[in-house]
Image: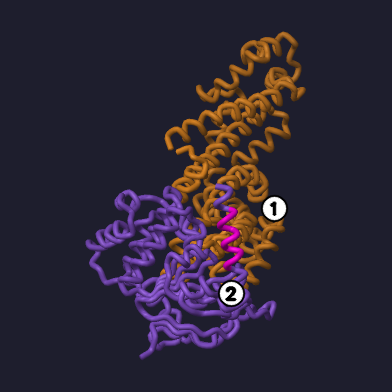
Chain colours: A orange, B purple
Amino acid sequence: MKRYIIKRAISFIPVLIGVSILCFLLIAFSGKDPAEVIARHGDMNATPELIEQVRVEMGLDGSLPERYLKWISGFFTGDFGLSITSYRLISEDIAEYFPITAGLVGMSLLWTLVLSIPFALLCARFKNSIFDHLTRGITIFGMCIPTFWLGFMLLIVLAVQMNWFTVLPEPGIKGYILPSLALSIPTICGIIRLFRSSLLSELSCDYVRYAKARGLSSTRILLCHVFRNALPPIVTVFCQYLGTLIVGSAVMEAVFSIEGIGSYLISAVLSADSTSAATCIVIIAVVFIAANFVGDMINRFLCPWIAGEHNDT
Amino acid sequence: MSKLIEIKQLEIIIKKEQHTVVRKIDFSLDKGKSLIILGQSGCGKTMTCHSMMGLLDPKKFSISGGIFYNGTDLLTLSAKEKRKLYGGEIAFIPQNPMTALDPSMKIGKQMLETLSLHIDVSKNERKNAVLNALKKSGLGDAERVYHSFPFELSGGMLQRVLIAMVLMVNARLVIADEPTTALDVVHRNETIEAFRQLRESGTAVLMVTHDFAAAVQLGGDIMIMNEGEIIETGKASEILTAPNHSYTRSLIEASVLTANIREVSE
């Protein structure tokens, strides 16, 4: 297992280097001169000398490799430079906005876990029942709904009409309930469909037939044997959703007026703040890779035969 | 006196296609005896086995007739009553040992699970009971097998584990569905020997196979099936040396031919 972990960790390095180079090229060829933007922010009539001075101060006068190394070292020192959107240190912005998005995505994942697993289990246990058919219809509908529309609908119904929530973000967990729900509903529906199908596929396996022949009840077979073996595809997709949810949170943050990393990324892109945007993209890439790695580890723990199949324990 | 298991007018129909796979067959088996159901693939032998084990989905199959175990019709029992019998008094050995066990659960845990359902043993003695059964089935390194996952063992070892489960629960009737198909010659001989020992200890053995060599080795009674019907029944030695039915003869000839080809190729 140790060998596998080291192997996987090493395999992440080229991926991260690739992502960071692509993001850096985005900064370099964005066509916007950060030194000029910063100089003009202080003085609209900034002279070329002043702009040059800012460029030197910010270390933007070096060659591309030098500038890349300086920027990438920010991920180790915490100094990513100045944001031309907020005129604050990018690290300060990230420290402020990232926990908000993490809370939103965390709660969305919690909704996904709590709602999708029991529904999928019930659908598989009572396959082709009215409950199964009804759930199928609802989940297909749920997967097709655009999240921004769902967000607006939740706001109109639960905040404006029922007055259970406020339209503007509330402090604490309550402020996360509606956006996380709107963000997670398509994911929940997708996972219900996928997990049901995974459970049914496992239920047709030989070991299930033999478990029945050993005298085990259907419920016990489903919960103690089939459930665990049906989890790996769900764990993989669930971890991939983590990255998708962070990016998707930008829309929800805009709908619910939340200032998270998603909306920060959007505003950085809109104002051509390529350094902030690239820094955010690399951080999201790190989270995405880490989530996939954790998913792999969970799968190996749940189903040790996966490691046996690949013969790399 | 009633037989241990008696099949009366058993008929199995696939509902969707209205296709009859087993046509009103009758046979019986007493304790300490063995019966081998022989026939080509698709002749209905596995369906017969599965119906006896309650493994056929009533939504897909229509089953009529009677399967009497000690005089009780298994087809009329509730799910709870069936669970008490299956895996305990009536044990099953499936066709492919490699896929018969939960791949994510250790062998020992799966055996303990079966044991606790059927045998009243104190918690402390359970592990010993499992280890003893594994040793009895010929698995010398029982402790290692107990802590292994199914994918860590060979097909032959897994077949032994399945036999150990039968030994562990003191089954009175063992139904084995082509138990030698997935095995090499050495493991096949060992498995047949294990069945012989089971029979000698008083357990009734019903084996379904299309492997004539295995049938000859096990001996006892033989029942030839074709297209869902029993076409010939009798002692193994009699049927295999002097078959009455032309189908049985063609089966034996095909089997001899296959054996010869195997011999030449080896």
Read off the magenta span: B252-261
Instruction: Identify the disc placed on residue A148.
Output: 1
Please name the amino acid that badge 1 sits on. Answer: Phe
User: Which chain contains the residue that carries disc 2?
Assistant: B
Please name the amino acid that badge 2 sits on. Answer: Gly
Left or right side of B95 for B162: left
Identified at 56% across, 64% down, the residue is A204
Q: Position of residue B62 (x, y in %)?
A: 60, 82
Identified at 64% across, 71% down, the residue is A134
| Residue tagged 2 | B44
Q: Which SS does the magenta portion mostly show?
A: helix
Above or below, B219 relative to B262? below
Q: Position of residue B209 (x, y in %)?
A: 52, 67
Whether callout 1 and callout 2 share a subunit is answered: no
SS of the residue under disc 2: loop
Above or below, A306 relative to B119? above
